[in-house]
Image (tube, rainbow, N blue to C red):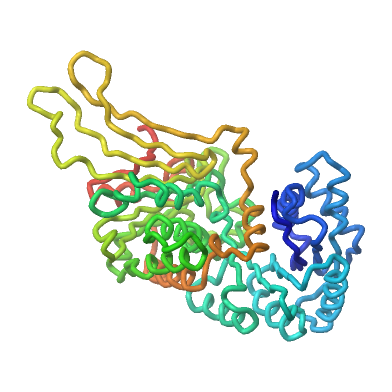
Amino acid sequence: MPTERRSLIMLFGATGDLATRKLYPAMLKLFEKGNIRDHFAVIGTSRYKFDDEKYREMVMKSVSKESTNKKQIADFASHFYFVTHDVTDLEHYSVLRDKANELDKKYELNGNRVFYISMAPNFFGTVAKNLKAQHLLSEGNGFNRLVIEKPFGRDFESAKQLNDDLSNAFDEDQIFRIDHYLGKEMIQNIEAIRFGNTIFEALWNNRYIDNIQVTLAEKLGVEERAGYYDNSGALRDMVQNHIMQIVSLLAMEQPVAFKDTDIRAEKVKALRSLRVYNVAEASSNFVRGQYAAVGNDKEYREEDGVPKDSNTETFVAGKLMFDNYRWSGTPFYIRTGKKLADKFTRVDVVFKKPLVDIFAFPQSGSTPLNANVLTIFIEPNQGFSLMVNAKNSEQGFHTEPVQLQFLEDSKRTKETPQPYERLIHDVLKGDGTNFASWPEVASAWKFVDQIRRVWDIQQPMFPNYIPGSMGPVSADELLARDHREWVYKLNK
């Protein structure tokens, strides 16, 4: 039986897109499974002039596709309350405080409180400061936890300022920085594959692995996010958070125990050993791109809300090097972009070939052995495959690559908890394993900032890749210089 978690959830930005598309459906799933049931309440806040009834109607509408059980949905929505709130008005916090105290008694919440800020990042510090100053943090045995969405700043300095603001009101172990990628099934499976299988962990080092590739591809363009995206770009929007978190899970040492403090400690160690490039290294090891027009699709600079001379990158590929005993000399290649061939996320671990290919004897006509490749399919498919060499069934002795593969079936995939369901549950448990700690965020920004500084003083030749491709030619050349190639590539 699931453990019921008692808590008040105070949601800032309760009428926003994220709340209606992701948060309320995730909470309903937790309600259906009994993770939250009788002893929870939600206070939604925004500038809108809602009352409880109108707010509950909005919540029920947002979860209507998740369930046909109208009674259960109504029971769920009955735990939701609305307070019109201006986060900059101190008087409004007294209303929130009174409502929180009232609901704490009504639902017997034991003083447990989660403050979820689903707003623009410039409000994070304001809300955190006022929550403490206006005495909304409960005292006694109850917990206080702050949840914030990315972006965590736009460079190291702004991220540090944001963290300082949050730290004035909350301790580090009370701050949960959500990166929804860390809630994905196969991202969490990285640790199981690595540390639960001797055949992989024994080989998970520079002696046996030639390179590791991480690809986060998107098929769509910037769509309605053009205004935000042009101030961010692929480097800040995808590399600094999602990709760096995935890379840290792939690169870290085995933790002492499978708990959040130990896992975070090893991720931080890995990121601190990541080589921060100088100007020349950054120029040669990272490439950027911007999509062109094709057919009826506009080029990036013609998208609504994008300046005609924008140099914002919609594609990034790079080579990462770790200066530590496990990974010295083994590159991690990353790439992400919009308007690519398809939407998918995958990790390819390329093992070194045998030192001697005994099957390539003279006049054998045998093709060279392929590298063994472990592929972790993160989305849309979930599973993994291992490419091995085997004898084919033809006359003579010839090898061919064969694939050992496991993919989740559609039924099991449908039953798999979605990222926000997992992560909200982890917040209620107080488990910080799948959340970014400040040292992780800081290390990632220090690395990314150096790339950004170099790009800001260079004039790119944009646009430089066609929608439906896998990015600019320079992304292939990045690996070709090392006599390597991307495992996933389009057929020529």
Q: Split into 4 quadrants, where in the image is the C terminus?
A: top left
Q: Residue at x 76, y 68 (%)?
A: 10
Q: Is residue 211 left or right of residue 411?
A: left
Residue 440: give x, y in percent of width and height: 47, 69
Give the residue at the far top of this rendering. Answer: 395
Q: Residue at x 35, y 47 (%)?
A: 198
Residue 320: give x, y in percent of width and height: 34, 60
Residue 135, picture quadrant: bottom right
Q: Is residue 160 left or right of residue 137?
A: left
Q: Residue at x 30, y 52 (%)?
A: 478
Q: Residue at x 77, y 73 (%)?
A: 111
The residue closer to the viewer here, 229 or 157, is 157
The residue closer to the viewer here, 17 or 424, is 424
Give the residue at the far front of this rendering. Answer: 1
Total marks shown come to 0
Residue 229 visible, this orientation: yes
Vertical placement of 363 versus 229: above or below?
above
Give the residue at the far bottom of this rendering. Answer: 133
Residue 279: give x, y in percent of width and height: 31, 70
